[in-house]
Image (cartoon, coloured by chain):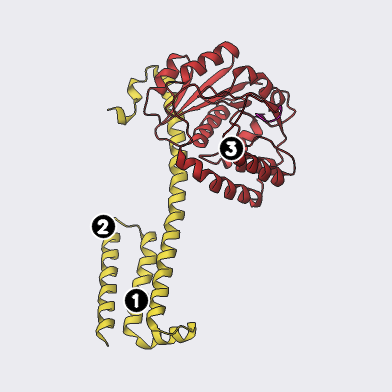
Chain colours: A yellow, B red
Amino acid sequence: MTRAQLIAALIAALVALVVLELVRRRRLSEDFSLLWVLATLGATMLAFWSGLLTGITHALGAKYETSTIFFFGILFVLVMLLYYAVKLTALIQEVRRLAQEAALLRLKVEEKVGDDAATRPGRSA
Amino acid sequence: MRPLVVVPAHNEEQCLPHTLAELAREAPGLDVVVIDDGSRDRTRHVAREAGAKVITLPVNLGVGGALQTGIRYALERGYDVVVQFDADGQHDPRDLPRVLAPVLEGRVDLSIGSRFVSDDPAYRAAPMRRAGMMLFSLVTSLAIGRRLSDTTSGFRAYSRRVMWLCLDYFPQDFPDAPLLIWLARNGVRWTEVPVTMRPRVAGTSFYTFTRKAYYPYKTLLASLLACWRAPRKEEPST
């Protein structure tokens, strides 16, 4: 095992630990952790099984192992970003819907109570 | 048939009193609801003082998000027609009956107040804006197979069927060409009626420089995708 492989394995293990700890503390949901866990597993496998990286590099027709690593690294980041963009879009739609419901409910309360002092938004406080 | 005038307003304390007063004077008896779209000024109070019903959004959603709120309200309270009306005084309330009539009479589901139907010589847009308007008019007309002259008009009347469709899909910041394409693809019957547009009374437009630059990209993409999206089969539930 080369020094580079050892460092890669250590970093992968560290990231995996941080991710699992975040999930344990409920600071990260299980759904969001999935891609990270998969990535650390992949990195660990590559670190311990040196023939695998060479094999993949040949299969892809790449010249150097480093290219393969960077290729998959960048691919991972892109998938992650797209996943977040999709999640963000869903969140935006949910927030919009909630804001609309809140506004309509507020009107109903105001119509019942008459005065709007009770329902003044938080930003004025 | 009960119509409701929906006025989306974001930081429009300067324009609203004038607009609402003119509405009350020129179109008496019409229900008006102002959607305060997360304003930081006194929009809400100004509208209240003018005697309008006000729905206050806790955050700023954009013109589309505000309009959709008004549409939800209209459906909830059993209104049959919604008229979208600008807060900034651009629209002339004297045009309201003309915009409303085709929908009230049940001839169409969507009535669009257009600056270009009668080639109003008073309306002159800046060259870039004019080019953009022509482009989107062309794109929309091609997409729906019939000439639509004014895609950017914010003076429109919607029937209940259109309101249902607007709950399902409504572009949030620029509810223009993509919305019209989507509605037409759902078999909505529409017409354009001539209206006059005036310069805004005071305050600042929603269309800041960045929004103006971003508008063509977003609208073009959404228009193309609206052609691609399958029409709805059944009416959504509230």
Magenta residues span B113-118
Which of the numbered marks, if any, corresponds to residue A43? 1
Identify the image quadrant of the N terminus of chain B.
top right
Q: Amino acid at mark 2?
A: Arg
Q: Nearer the viewer, mark 1 or mark 3?
A: 3
Rendering coords of residue A73 (x, y %): 39, 71
Q: Nearer the viewer, mark 1 or mark 2?
A: 1
Reply yes or no: does residue B175 show up in magenta: no
Q: Against A22, is A108 above or below?
A: above
Which of the numbered marks, if any, corresponds to residue B127? 3
Give the crowd class for mark 3: few <14, some 14-19, many >=20 residues within 10 Å. Answer: few
Please tell me which residue lies in front, B238 or B73: B73
Identify the image quadrant of the C terminus of chain B.
top right
Say which residue appears at 32% left-offset and 78% top-offset: A44
Q: Amino acid at mark 3?
A: Pro
Q: Against B21, is A47 above or below?
A: below
